[in-house]
Image (cartoon, rainbow, N blue to C red):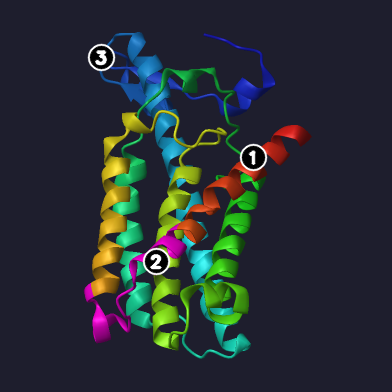
Amino acid sequence: MVNDSPALKKADVGFAMGSGTEVAKEAGDITILDDNFSSIEKAILYGRTMFKSIRKFLIFQLTVNVAAVLTCFLGPMLGENVVMTVVQLLVVNQAMDTLAAIAFGSEPALQEYMKDRPIPRSESIVTREMLTEIIISALYITSICLGILFIPFIRNLFGNVDVTYLKSALFATFMMAITFNGFNARTDKMNVFEGIGRNRNFLLVTLSLLLLQFVFITFGGEALSVEALSPSAWLICFILAFLVIPIDIIRKAVIGKRS
């Protein structure tokens, strides 16, 4: 099959059928084990799904890493030597690395992916739009977490409490914000909840992360350098964290108008 489209030429993938010669198999990028031509369509569909899942995971993970680095770097500059402890950062990494990989690795193969234009081989796996999403989300998470410690308006929402309590609220907000940002990462559509029911693992992982952070902060004590939060404090943290979703929707709307 020959196609003269420049875009397709850049993204051409060679297929070899299972009954082909060894030379053809070695020359092809992908070898189809059977002789069914519909398998080529399936290979393209699952290949695109896998590539999209990798990009979604990168958006999620890079946002977590950038937000964590900025929070821990700027905190001491603003007067608080330890914003999140080493143990807390290990909890973030373990929970987000393992569970997020399960969540985004379970994204379904949607037939609509076949309508996408082929991606040139020379294109970077991290696009400019992805970088924009990562930076904006990370800056918001960093700002709102540091605001709990250093901005009087936000700090006073938790009442007259000690620094450990505020840091516990910061940790809770950080964990919830990066969890909610998973909804932003999984789709480039305005409705971040569209088709969410098709990936049950994503929902299970999200619920597990929310439950785990509640357990960590409520029962972590000295091991995690936290104090149990009141219901009102949890509600404040939840609202502050959830705002990462509408902020990214605004970003998508702005980019959509420019394109």
Residues under numbered marks 2 and 3 in contact, where contact means CB atoms less than 8 Å apart: no
Q: Residue at x 44, y 35 (%)?
A: 193
Q: Which mark is residue 55?
A: none
**Which residue bears the numbered disc 3?**
34
Q: Badge 2: how crowded within 10 Å, few (<14), some, or many (20+)? A: few
Taking depth in this image into account, of 195 and 99 the one nearest to the observer is 195
Overall secondary structure of the magenta stretch? helix
Please indicate whether residue 179 sits to the left or right of residue 63 in the image. Answer: left
- Indicate which disc residue 252 carries: 1
Residue 228 highlighted magenta (yes or no): yes
Q: Count up the numbered dots.
A: 3
Q: Does the rendering let one see residue 259?
A: no
Report helix, strand or loop for mark 2.
helix
Give how far across and how far down residue 65 sits, in percent. 48, 65
**Region rendered in magenta:** 219-238
The foreground one among 115 and 212 is 212
Please state which of the two labelled residues, at mark 2 or mark 3, is closer to the viewer: 2
Residue drawn at x 57%, y 56% as measured from the top left: 137
Residue type for callout 1? Lys
Residue 99, relative to residue 23: is it above or below? Answer: below
CB within 8 Å, label 2 to label 1: no
